[in-house]
């Protein structure tokens, strides 16, 4: 598992909060997007596409089911970006 | 209204669609009351554009004052919402809810929505396309804005917000779209497809819209003064209406100006609407053109001036006061008729003609009978 860079984690948290419509202050790193935060698969695609644009990367759509919370989304992004 | 007089609705054929409520989000402000007061005062709405709107072809605009989407609709689901959808949602709240947010209009599984537009949210579509062309890769776009780019999003979002499961339709007809929507609702109610309709039309102001209109203007013409907003009505059949009727829709007619003679087209369309309504032009209480700042708009005014009595033509202040509100204009014209009628007891039982003409040659006319009810 990649070592977490705090600035990148913080930015990813912002992107997620904006795209799944939750308050940044209440978004924990382990809360489940769909089961706990009321997101749907369409919103997760928004997250994926926003991360791709932010870091100029391409995330395989097959990674979408792994992006269940902030922590996991960071790992998926890090793998795609080669951090 | 005298109790000795037969109520106007007693003379309506069964099933005649009647307007039983209305709301407006306009350059006069958010809400029917601001619109009605502004229209009755004949107040101008043009202001200097906010710098946040970016570079514009004209510094004057007629925008809805204080229209903050998240403040009016809350934060959830609105971060990427287009202005057109927000205008329609706020107008629908004004129509169906009271000031405390409680539902005051009953709806059922056959309550429909039909909204007239021009091209949806131009700003949303152009921003999205710009991202695709200018970002590093064509698919680096804000995917969260995609749903707001569809033409029927505002009508769909209105139905979802209020749980309306009847027919849901968007009519893209530019300046005539408010009357096309009215005709659509009238037809579907007549066929038993809907028991009640939210019907109206909307236009948003944006830099993209302003530059589009500037480019489309005839050579040498100044950039048009643009407005925006949404007018919505509650339409029900007269015999099952749950609220007092404000106006009955006696007829709606449409045609296309194929001879490049808008005056003749408007005259023919208005005459046919009057004939179908059984109304003599000389008896009109009000005649309201869309007042588009185009050659077709001037021809429309000439046509009505030749058709209707002078006092009918001056009864309702010119729609020019709101700027060119394009798709929203016909709904604002009807709202303006209702606003003036509600403070004039002499309007009860009288008739109003509302016309619209688009630069692509579409022409429409509606005849309403005012029922003398206050909202």
Image (cartoon, coloured by chain):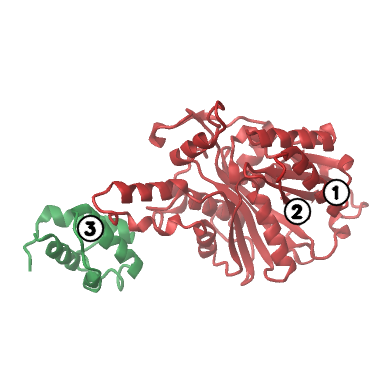
Chain colours: A green, B red
Asked if residue B152 lies left or right of residue A68, the reply is right
Earlier in the chain: of badge 1 and badge 2, it is 2
Provide the residue designation for mark 3: A52
> Can you give x and y, in whole percent of width and height, for residue B2 in the image?
89, 48
Q: Are marks 2 and 3 on the same chain?
A: no
| Looking at the image, residue A34 lies above or below residue B312 | below
Q: Which one is closest to the eye, mark 1 or mark 2?
A: 2
The spot of residue B155 in percent (x, y) is: 54, 59
- Is B356 placed above or below A62 here? above
- Cα separation between marks 1 and 3: 63 Å
CA separation, marks 1 and 2? 18 Å
Residue topped by disc 2: B252
The residue positioned 92% from the left and 51% from the top of the image is B5
Q: Secondary structure at mark 1?
A: loop
On the image, which quarter does residue B189 sit in?
Answer: bottom right
The foreground one among B98 and B197 is B197
Q: Position of residue B283 (x, y in %)?
A: 88, 42
């Amino acid at each position: 598992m990649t070592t977490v860079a705090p600035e990148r984690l913080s930015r990813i948290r912002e992107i997620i909060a904006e795209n799944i419509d939750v308050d940044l202050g209440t978004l924990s790193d382990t809360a489940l997007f769909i089961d706990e935060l009321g997101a749907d698969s369409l919103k997760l695609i928004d997250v994926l596409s926003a991360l791709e644009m932010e870091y100029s990367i391409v995330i395989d759509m097959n990674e979408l089911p792994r992006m269940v919370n902030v922590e996991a989304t960071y790992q998926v992004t890090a793998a795609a970006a080669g951090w | 209204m005298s109790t000795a007089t037969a109520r106007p609705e007693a003379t309506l054929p069964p099933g005649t669609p009647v307007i039983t409520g209305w709301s407006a989000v306009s350059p006069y402000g958010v809400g029917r009351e601001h619109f009605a007061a502004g229209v009755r005062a004949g107040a101008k709405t043009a202001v200097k554009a906010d710098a946040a709107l970016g570079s514009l072809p004209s510094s004057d605009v007629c925008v809805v004052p204080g229209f903050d989407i998240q403040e009016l609709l809350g934060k959830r689901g609105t971060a990427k919402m287009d202005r057109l959808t927000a205008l329609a949602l706020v107008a629908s709240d004004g129509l169906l809810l009271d000031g405390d947010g409680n539902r005051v209009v009953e709806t059922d599984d056959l309550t429909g929505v039909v909204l007239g537009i021009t091209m949806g949210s131009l700003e949303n579509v152009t921003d999205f396309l710009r991202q695709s062309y200018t970002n590093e890769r064509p698919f680096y776009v804000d995917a969260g804005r995609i749903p707001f780019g569809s033409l029927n999003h505002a009508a769909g979002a209105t139905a979802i917000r209020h749980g309306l499961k009847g027919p849901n339709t968007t009519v893209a007809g530019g300046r005539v779209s408010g009357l096309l929507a009215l005709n659509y609702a009238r037809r579907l109610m007549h066929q038993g497809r809907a028991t009640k309709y939210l019907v109206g039309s909307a236009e948003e102001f944006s830099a993209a819209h302003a530059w589009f209109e500037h480019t489309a203007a005839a050579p040498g013409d100044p950039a048009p003064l643009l407005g925006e907003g949404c007018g919505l009505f509650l339409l029900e059949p007269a015999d099952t209406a749950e609220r007092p009727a404000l106006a009955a829709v006696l007829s709606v007619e449409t045609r296309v100006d194929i001879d490049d003679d808008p005056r003749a087209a408007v005259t023919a369309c208005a005459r046919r609407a009057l004939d179908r309504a059984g109304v003599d032009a000389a008896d009109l209480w009000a005649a309201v053109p869309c007042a588009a700042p185009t050659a077709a708009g001037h021809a429309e005014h000439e046509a009505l001036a030749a058709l209707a009595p002078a006092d009918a033509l001056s009864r309702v202040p010119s729609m020019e006061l709101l700027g060119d509100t394009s798709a929203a204009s016909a709904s604002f014209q009807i709202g303006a008729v209702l606003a003036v009628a509600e403070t004039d007891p002499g309007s009860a039982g009288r008739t109003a003609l509302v016309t619209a003409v688009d630069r692509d040659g579409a022409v429409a006319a509606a005849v309403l009978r005012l029922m003398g009810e206050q909202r």
